[in-house]
Amino acid sequence: MLKTKTNDEKADTLLTKSLVPIIDLAHCGTEECPVRSVVNRVGQQLHKALSEKGLALLVNHGIADEKLKTAWDHLDDFVELPTDVKEHYIRTGEDNHGYVSPGLECFDGKIPELRHAFNICTLNAKDLPEEPLPGFADHISTLAEDFKSLARFILQALAISFDIPHTFFLERHSHMLSGDHDNETTLRLLYYPPVIEEDENGKNEFIKGHCKYSYQRCVTNLPDFRPEYNPRDDFNELDGDNNRIDELKQTTERRLPNGDMIRCGAHTDYGTFTLLAQDSEGGLEVKLTGTEKWQRLGHLPGAILVNCGEILTIWTQNRYLALPHRVVIPEQEHLRTRGRHSIAFFCHPDNLTLISPYDLPLPADVQDTTCKKTRKKSFKAAKEKVYNAYQLIQKRFRETYQNHYTS
Ligand SMILES: O=C(O)CCC(=O)C(=O)O
Ligand SMILES: [Fe+2]
């Protein structure tokens, strides 16, 4: 007799199809003093995941799903506030804190981003929309503290993966979310509105700034790593054939009535690493280390993605490469016409930390093969070019918001 698969069996089968290494944090990711043996194991697993792929999915990390969902509810409420109220909370550029409305950011330097973002760099209630939205400050501050604890866990695990004292990275990230302008770490709430080509007035939902689905739960609680045919993949095979690429773009890229839009352009994150939670599949694609092809990441409900940022790449002398990623407008109508929420925690070193590629020990094989003279020479060159974390990130902010600054 043919046996039908249980949900758990289906989930297991789908998990084995995941592109991404899955790391179990044994529920101690947010603990102040996590069990040492778990930190050691995660350190070894992170080393393999980040050096081979540039990312990993964290499960049993200690941040309850309900907390994430409530944060997304708060963001939806914020987006629905009248424009003049929202204006009080707009990101000014002096620091990264505040609301960023759709169209202001441009990660790939070309196409404006189709999303609402609220950046949180300080937990001070007066800088959060507590007055129009009672409960916002309390909830978001607790969640931000959870993400900070999880980041501290990862920082310790990373140190272990390099065989250096477990406090090495912690000491260089000691001001995260302190509100004293000494560290650019940011918790970012994101909402991508549904993309509906035309409504009855001939306008797109996004252009009206109205969110048809203000909140959505995942379609399913099963992992979703189905490989799907994506016509954009054809671009990957067509290096250099510009005519053919243009022709394909006409048929595969979603254009809105007022021009090109994308959910989030291709980029790498600027900091040490990023933790990312997403409420549903909504177009997140990655280029895994060593590959040139955009791949759909898929969705594992409740998991938090950790991906390597540019500062960690410098620190590790390119052993952990920053992960190129983007959020495209999904081809499938049932995904495109639903909104999508995510939360990103960008973990940054303290501003004055010098990011030198010579702080970490070289792996044994590199040490053996690199002759002393070359090492001396490159050390001198590297010494001349060392920037601090603040200088590195400000340069990247200027590039991302260049349209805004010049307009
Ligand atoms: O929303 C997402 O899934 C990704 C967001 C992102 O990559 C970013 O804001 O840097
Ligand atoms: Fe990103």
Image (tube, rainbow, N blue to C red):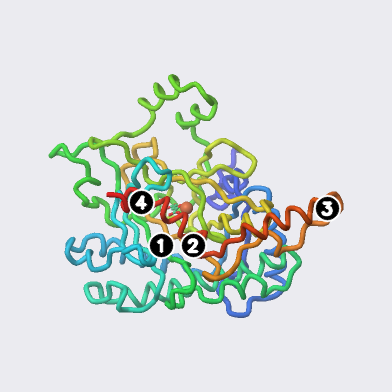
Residue type indicated by callout 4: Glu
Instruction: Answer yes or no: disc 1 within 8 Å of ligand 1.
Output: yes
Residue 346's label in the rendered image is: 2
Q: Residue at x 48, y 47 (%)?
A: 267
Residue 188's label in the rendered image is: 1
User: Looking at the image, is mark 2 or mark 4 earlier in the sequence?
Assistant: 4
Q: What's the distance in space between the residues labelled 2 and 1, CA to CA? A: 8 Å
Instruction: Answer yes or no: disc 2 within 8 Å of ligand 1.
Output: yes
Residue identified by numbered label 3? 373
Residue type indicated by callout 3: Lys
User: Looking at the image, is mark 1 or mark 3 earlier in the sequence?
Assistant: 1
Q: Are marks 2 and 1 in contact (CB under 8 Å)?
A: yes
User: Looking at the image, is mark 4 or mark 3 earlier in the sequence?
Assistant: 4
In the rendered view, does 160 fall on the left or right side of 346? right
Q: Position of residue 404 (x, y in %)?
A: 31, 52
Q: How many marks?
A: 4
Q: Residue at x 15, y 37 (%)?
A: 202
In the rendered view, does 300 fall on the left or right side of 376? left
Instruction: Answer yes or no: disc 3 within 8 Å of ligand 2.
Output: no
Q: Residue at x 71, y 61 (%)?
A: 358
Q: What's the distance in space between the residues labelled 1 and 3, CA to CA? A: 45 Å
Q: Secondary structure at mark 3?
A: helix
Q: Position of residue 378 (x, y in %)?
A: 73, 53
Q: Are marks 4 and 1 in contact (CB under 8 Å)?
A: no
Q: Are marks 1 and 3 in contact (CB under 8 Å)?
A: no
Q: Quadrant of residue 65?
A: bottom left
Q: Secondary structure at mark 2?
A: strand
Q: Quadrant of residue 186?
A: bottom left
